[in-house]
Amino acid sequence: MPVFRAPYRFIVPAGSLLVGIACVFASGAWAQGLPSGGGRDLYRKLRFKALGLARKGRTDESIPYFRRMARLQPYNEKALWLYALALLHQKRASKGAFKRDARRAVRLLQSCVLMQKRYRKRSRALGLRYFFLGMAFWYAGDSLQALYSFQKAYRADYDRLDAVYNEYALLNELGKKGEATLALRRYIRLVKSSKVDD
């Protein structure tokens, strides 16, 4: 059995050394400076590092960590959600790269919506996923899908008045002035009624 010697030092917190080395080289973590290893400990380290960077406003630097979290646990809705948010909130991407990342965020958020719909047809979490799905479609240049997502966001969570406002903004952007005026009136009516309820 051949023995692989890494040019860099690394720590394998869980699992056998050979499995750990294979994971590190297969993922390219040794080249990116990402934590290596496997299992729950690796996920926790990645999450801690990614959220720490994101809280400091260094979203661009957190993207590789969120990506690795999503690849490590593709069934984890929270990992997909955080990765999609990081892609949408990055600061230094070129216009073409940002559109590509917005399309990637659309796919991630569609998965999140499907996972959330398994639990409830209406909830704040589902409304929030639909809202950011609409934002991702809008950033990717698909205004009609964005409009549809904002409508779904409001239907999933009646407190998502920002989704109703974005409907107005999109309709206005698409040149549908009559529908935009109706959406703005609806938004104003909903804002007034929500203030009375509070």
Image (cartoon, helix red, strand yellow):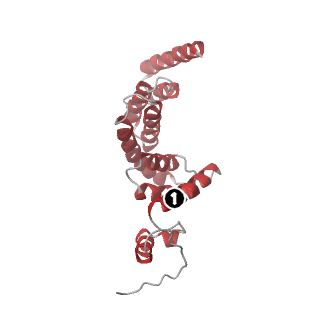
- Kind of residue at badge 1: Tyr
The one nearer the camera, 105 or 35, is 35
Q: Is residue 40 above or below residue 123?
A: below
* Snapshot quadrant of residue 136: top left
- Looking at the image, the residue that sits furthest to the front is 15
Q: Nearer the viewer, residue 194 or 125?
A: 125
The foreground one among 53 and 87 is 53
Q: Position of residue 30 (x, y in %)?
A: 50, 72
The vertical placement of 44 against 161, above or below, is below
Instruction: Name, please, the residue furthest toward the bottom.
Output: 2
Look at the image and tell me in which quarter the C terminus lies. top right
- Mark 1, other Cα within 10 Å: few <14 / some 14–19 / many ≥20: many
Residue drawn at 44 percent across, 62 percent down = 39
Q: Give 15 or 142, whichever is nearer the viewer.
A: 15
Q: Residue at x 55, y 78 (%)?
A: 9
Residue at x 59% of width, y 51% of height: 54
Q: Quadrant of the N terminus?
A: bottom left
Total residue callouts: 1
Q: Which residue is mark 1?
A: 65
Residue 56, percent from left and from top? 65, 51
The picture quadrant where one finds residue 119 is: top left
In the picture, measured across the screen, residue 115 lies left or right of residue 8, that is left
Vertical order, 73 against 166 (above or below): below
Give residue 124's position: percent from left, percent from top. 47, 30
Q: Secondary structure at mark 1?
A: helix
Q: Indicate the position of residue 20 as horizontal and vertical percent values.
A: 44, 72
